[in-house]
Image: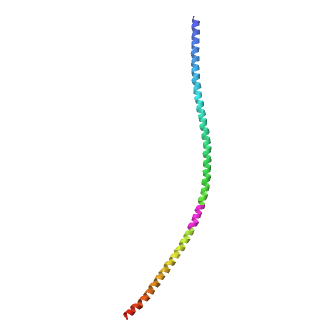
């Protein structure tokens, strides 16, 4: 009888071990499936980031080229503005000279008018006195 009980114990233990192994195998398979899904998602994200990085790099290169063109244009505009400023300075000097000429001319005309007025006023006063 001890042999039968031992055999039964071995069979029971084996059945428990097989059940535990099956249970653990199912849990392991679920974990592996979850890890594979996470790995697939991670791969998609990495691929998306890589393509985004390539896209962003392309945008950065295009913007850098545009900035370089704008810098060249700005230098040209700066040079043109400098030349325009110089022309305006020269015109301002000419206008100052013209204004000075007009001021002197107008002052001379006023002086001549005053002198003519005095000349015209003097004989009348003398005729009234005499």
Report the magenta stretch's main SS.
helix
Q: Quadrant of residue 91?
A: bottom right
Q: How many numbered discs sit on the rendered protein?
A: 0
Above or below for 114 versus 54: below
Q: Position of residue 23 (x, y in %)?
A: 57, 20
Q: Quadrant of residue 27?
A: top right
Determine the residue positioned at 59% across, 64% down: 80
Residue 47 in magenta?
A: no
Determine the residue positioned at 40% across, 91% down: 124
Q: Quadrant of the N terminus?
A: top right
Determine the residue positioned at 59% across, 31% down: 37
Q: How is the image coloured?
A: rainbow
Q: Residue furthest left?
A: 129
Q: Residue furthest bottom?
A: 130
Q: Position of residue 8 (x, y in %)?
A: 58, 9
Q: Is residue 32 left or right of residue 123?
A: right
Above or below for 48 versus 73: above
Q: Position of residue 113 (x, y in %)?
A: 46, 84
Above or below for 12 versus 61: above
Residue 79 in magenta?
A: yes
Q: Quadrant of residue 120?
A: bottom left
Q: Position of residue 53 (x, y in %)?
A: 60, 43
Instruction: Please state the extent of the stretch shown in magenta in the rendering.
Output: 76-85
Q: Quadrant of the C terminus?
A: bottom left
């Amino acid at each position: 009888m001890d042999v039968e009980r031992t055999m039964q114990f071995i069979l029971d233990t084996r059945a428990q071990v097989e059940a535990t192994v099956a249970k653990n195998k199912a849990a392991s398979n679920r974990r592996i499936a979850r890890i594979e899904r996470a790995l697939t998602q991670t791969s998609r994200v990495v691929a998306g980031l890589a393509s985004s990085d390539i896209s962003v790099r392309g945008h950065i290169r295009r913007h850098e080229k545009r900035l370089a063109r704008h810098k060249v244009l700005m230098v040209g505009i700066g040079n043109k503005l400098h030349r325009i400023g110089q022309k305006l300075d020269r015109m301002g000097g000419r206008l100052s000279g013209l204004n000075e000429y007009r001021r002197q001319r107008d002052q001379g005309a006023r002086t001549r008018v005053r002198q003519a007025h005095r000349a015209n006023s003097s004989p009348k006063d003398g005729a009234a006195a005499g």
